[in-house]
Image (spheres, grey):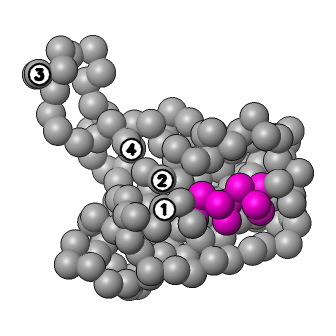
Amino acid sequence: MTGFAVSILRIPASADRFYEVCEFVRSRAAALGVPDSLHMKLDLVVEELVVNIASYAYPDGGGDVEVECERGFDPLDEGASGEFFCVRLRDWGLAFDPLQGPPPDVTAAMHKRDVGGLGVHLVREMTDSCRYERRQDMNEFTACFQIG
C-alpha cells in the first residue's frame, strides 16, 4: 500500500490489552483523516483480532502483537477504487488462519449453532477486504476499510 506515513505499535499479545490497540488505531485513524463514523467498526474488528491472536497464536501466553495503520489504496485489491484505511496485525505465534473456517450458520437457532466463528464472521462483514498470510514464522492479518 502506498499512501500516508505508516505507524506501528508493538505490545504484548494479551486479550486484556486490546483497548490499547483500539486507542492506537483510533488515534492513527484520526491523524490520517479517517471519518469518525468508522471508529465503531475499527474497535470491533481490532478487538476480535487481538483476542484471536492472544487465544490462538499464543495459547500458553507470551509473545507480541504488532499493529500497523496506513491510509492509501487497497493493497488487497488492485482493482479497487478510492482510498482505504488498513490495519495490519502481526504475531510470531502458532500459525492460525481465522479465514479458513466455514462461515457460521447465522440462521440456525442459538442452541444448535457451533461454538465460535461469529467473531471472524463479524470481521468479514465489517471490512471491505481482509486477508491472512503466514510468512515464515509470522502471522499477518490485514483488514481494510474504504474511506473515499
Q: Label 4: which residue?
A: 120
Q: Is residue 59 magenta?
A: no
- Say whether disc 1 or disc 4 marks the residue closer to the N-terminus: 1
* Disc 2 to disc 4: CB gap under 8 Å: no
**C-alpha gap between disc 3 and disc 1:** 29 Å
Q: Tell me which corner region of the image, top left, top right, bottom left or bottom right, holds residue 104.
A: top left
* Disc 2 to disc 1: CB gap under 8 Å: yes
Q: Label 2: which residue?
A: 47
Marks 3, 4: nearer the viewer: 3
* Disc 1 to disc 4: CB gap under 8 Å: no
Which of these two is toward me, 56 or 142? Answer: 56
Res 133 seen here: no
Q: Left or right: 25 with respect to 138?
A: right
Q: Main secondary structure of the magenta part?
A: helix
- Say whether disc 2 or disc 4 marks the residue closer to the N-terminus: 2
- Say whether disc 3 or disc 2 marks the residue closer to the N-terminus: 2
Label disc, if present, on residue 18 of the rendered structure: 1
**Residue at horizontal 65 percent and vertical 70 percent from the top:** 68
Mark 2 surroundings: few (<14), some (14-19) or many (≥20) residues within 10 A = many
**C-alpha gap between disc 3 and disc 4:** 19 Å
**C-alpha gap between disc 1 and disc 4:** 16 Å
**Residue at horizontal 20 percent and vertical 16 percent from the top:** 108
